[in-house]
Amino acid sequence: MKAIFPSAVIAATLLMSACGDGKSDAAKEMAAAADSVKAASTVDLGQYQMPLLLEVPQGCPAPSIVWKDASGKLEIRAGERFGLTIMEDAGDMQRLKGDLDRDLLKKNTILQETPDELVYQSQFPDDSTLVFIHFQRVVSAAGRSFVIQDMDNGTAFSKDDVDRMAGSISAKQPA
């Protein structure tokens, strides 16, 4: 009995040391889960015949993507603070700026402008609480042009919301 007991203790010690404390295995599992969440947050829009990728911002729920035949637009929603449309079009920023200048109902102010993106604020002069921030961005992919805009459905998006939406679409790199 005396000879069996020490060998049993040694075997148990070796077995426990071989298993480890589980922290490294847990870290590996967490890293794998984080990679899968990151991969799941990128949506290939190729199934809608658009060579684009949607990067769903962290904290947003899974997106709802609907093709609207009547308008020829792809509508993407992910929660209350994320809603945009994509349409194949060349996108004329000068025309948009002209339309904003000629708007008789709202006062429009350009907040940010690049050759491919315009962020502007629309405000009703009679009511200072009705302030809306919008964007239009043009993305070129595979020899085609797409116009991305915020979903103009009465939701008052913040500047952060607009920046998040505008940066969520990118051209899909050819394989």
Image (cartoon, rainbow, N blue to C red):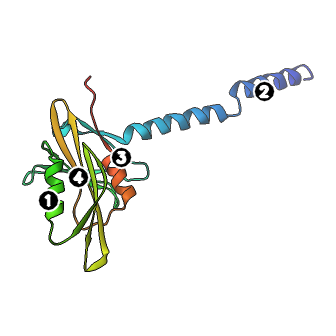
Mark closest to the chain's N terminus, 1 or 3: 3
Quadrant in the picture for the C terminus: top left
Looking at the rendered structure, which numbered label has been put on residue 12?
2
Nearer mark to the viewer, of 2 and 4: 4
- State the residue at coordinates (18%, 29%): 142
* Label 1 sits on residue: 99
Q: Quadrant of residue 103?
A: bottom left
In the structure shown, which secondary structural element does the residue marked by tag 1 occupy? helix
Residue 65, horizontal then vertical, whole percent: 23, 50
Residue, disc 3 = 56
Give the Cα separation between the discs numbered 1 and 3: 31 Å
- Up the image or down, 174 lies above or below 81; here it is above
Q: Whole-percent x and y of residue 164?
A: 37, 50
Residue at the far bottom in the pictured view: 126
- At label 2, the amino acid type is Ala
Left or right: 67 in relation to 123:
left
Q: Which residue is mark 4?
A: 149
Q: Marks 3 and 4: in contact by CB < 8 Å?
A: no
Earlier sequence position, callout 4 versus callout 3: 3
Classify residue 173 as left or right of residue 17.
Answer: left
**From the viewer's perspective, is residue 58 above or below residue 133?**
above
Q: Residues within 10 Å of mark 4 (few under 14, many from 20)?
A: many
Q: Which residue occupies 18% across, 48% down?
A: 93
Q: Label 4 sits on what residue type?
A: Gln
| Structural distance between the alpha carbons of marks 2 and 4 | 64 Å
Earlier along the polypeptide chain: callout 1 or callout 2? 2
Marks 1/2: CA–CA distance: 79 Å
Which residue shows up at 23% across the image and 69% down it? 107
Q: CA distance from mark 4 to mark 3?
A: 16 Å
